Amino acid sequence: MSSSRAAAGDASRARLPYSVAVNPPHDIGISSSAHSEVLLPAALERIAAVAPSAEVRSFGLHTLLSRRNRRAALEAGLPCSVHGPFGYTGLGDPSTAARLEALDEQRRHLEAAAEIGATLYLVHPDWRPDPGPRDAAVVAALERSFDALREMQVETGVPIVVENMPGAGCSHLTAPGDLDLRGLGFALDVGHAAISGTLDAFLAAPLPELRHVHLHSNAGFGDLGDPHLPLGAGVVDAAAVLAAARAAGASIVLELDDADDVAASLTYLRGRGLIA
Amino acid sequence: MVEDHDIGISTGAYYELSLGAALLRIAELAPSAEILSLGHHSLLEPINVRVVETAGLPFSVHGPFAHFEFGSRSAAKHRGAIDLHRRHMWVAAELGASLYVVHPDMQRRARRWDQRVADSLERAFEELSALQDEIGLPIAVENMPFDKHSHFIAPGDLDLKGLGLVLDTGHAAMTGTLGDWLNDPLADLRHVHLHDNLGHRDGDRHHPLGTGVIDVEPILEAARRAGASIVLEHKDEASVLASLDHLRSRGLLVRDLG
């Protein structure tokens, strides 16, 4: 078909009364956190309507320990990353028993993630609500946990990434170079980095381990409520983040708390020409 | 005198006794009971009805199990299970029960997830929900132990169709889902069964609290925050007494009126 005929066809279709605007595919996935009030099959259906991939938050209602949820994820046919469950200390707990219990929990969710063919599996390191000094015992515990997770990564074939946490002093992973990830990948949570005052540093020299990005916004340094605001509503420069993520070949996920914020973020990205 | 706390005791710990004797023992230890309405504690037995009428102890009722009927795709078996619950519920409601507990399916052998069984269970929950409204007695569904032996192990497995949730903490520990249940924003938590075990590689021991992997404090916090009732569900009185001691020693037994 010649370009002039194609253009004429497009113009003709645009006039059809049943023709509606359909946005072409983009490269931004959506976290199931935006649909935490509905069962996973419905959440994935809603995500599939607006995005090419999903991130399943494997806890609470969307836990992949549920066989029905695993089945729903497989039937959805949507590429999925999986966010593992998290607590406060977990993988960084200096108590070996508590740390092994946290690892055991991650293993069960990771195996479930492998069963649904997850593209990657994300874990949180330590976090505490009140800032404190760096603790060598916690660093050692985290790195032992990362070693164990790297073995699980090999066993299951699912790449594992570790996410930076919000608030300087609230975690041992808030800035570049804080921890040796021991062969695991890195997930840059840009909202968390903005709260910690480290987003510019993360973007200026992206870590070679960067595999995944969580997109959301907030009021910036010290906004410890971690409100997961839609893009455009806070300080996060989405253009710079997307450029860094795409240059690194990292997957990108909008991690918001409701569907309206997802729609607002996608509209914002489209309005700025950052997605098609 | 009974301590001022808010934790009931299941008659399952006194199964060798008559229901009257079991309720007398429980009344010495707790402010309420859960009557396991099967066998010689069945509320379909007229003597048990008279015993409960005179006991004066607040109580919930645990219905008969009907595991295999609910695990079947046969509509006739499902109808039979619902009729069974209807008979127990009527008596429980007449006697003033606060809540009626039902189990979903449970199979002897591991099975694949069967969407038809899940659909049948959700239809049964719709019928039980109608029965709940008709009789005026709240019904709550309990999570099961043993992954692959039931269709109700984790949040998201089944839509309870307006019925409440019984969080069985021992079962959740066995299936590794305790954290998920406590984090489920949709869970209509009405009731909690407390007992312990060694986690997801263990059996359904119903051991005393403090002897296994369960940290009871966040569970009690969640239950009290939700206004859910709480029951110790053990197989013998020694376990009941050990659990009460554990709760007392951790300062968790006395009702938190804050």
Image: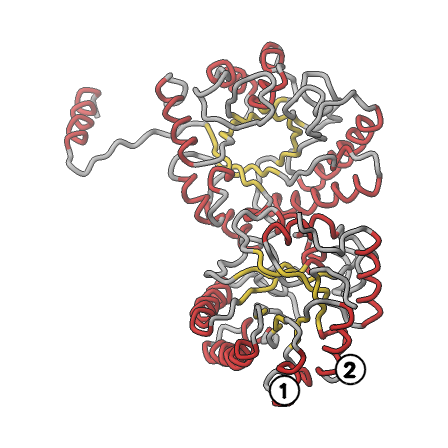
Quadrant the C terminus of chain A occupies: top left
For residue A135, say whether it is visible.
yes
Q: Tag on residue B50?
A: 1
- The residue positioned 44% from the left and 34% from the top of the image is A52
Determine which quarter of the picture holds residue A26.
Answer: top left
Q: Are marks 2 and 1 in contact (CB under 8 Å)?
A: no
Pinpoint the chain carrying mark 2. Answer: B
Number of labels in the image equals 2
- The residue positioned 62% from the left and 88% from the top of the image is B45
Name the amino acid type tagged 1: Arg
The residue carrying pointer 2 sits among few (fewer than 14), some (14 to 19) or many (20 or more) residues within 10 Å by Cα, namely few
Mark 2 or 1, closer to the camera: 1
- The residue positioned 81% from the left and 51% from the top of the image is B250
Name the amino acid type tagged 2: Glu
- The residue positioned 58% from the left and 76% from the top of the image is B66
The residue carrying pointer 1 sits among few (fewer than 14), some (14 to 19) or many (20 or more) residues within 10 Å by Cα, namely few
Q: What SS does tag 1 mark?
A: helix
The x and y percentages for residue A247 are 53, 16
Pinpoint the chain carrying mark 1. Answer: B
Q: Nearer the viewer, residue B171 or A25?
A: B171
For residue B146, say whether it is visible.
no
Q: What SS does tag 2 mark?
A: loop
The x and y percentages for residue B229 are 63, 61
Residue under label 2:
B16
Q: Is residue A194 above or below residue B140?
A: above
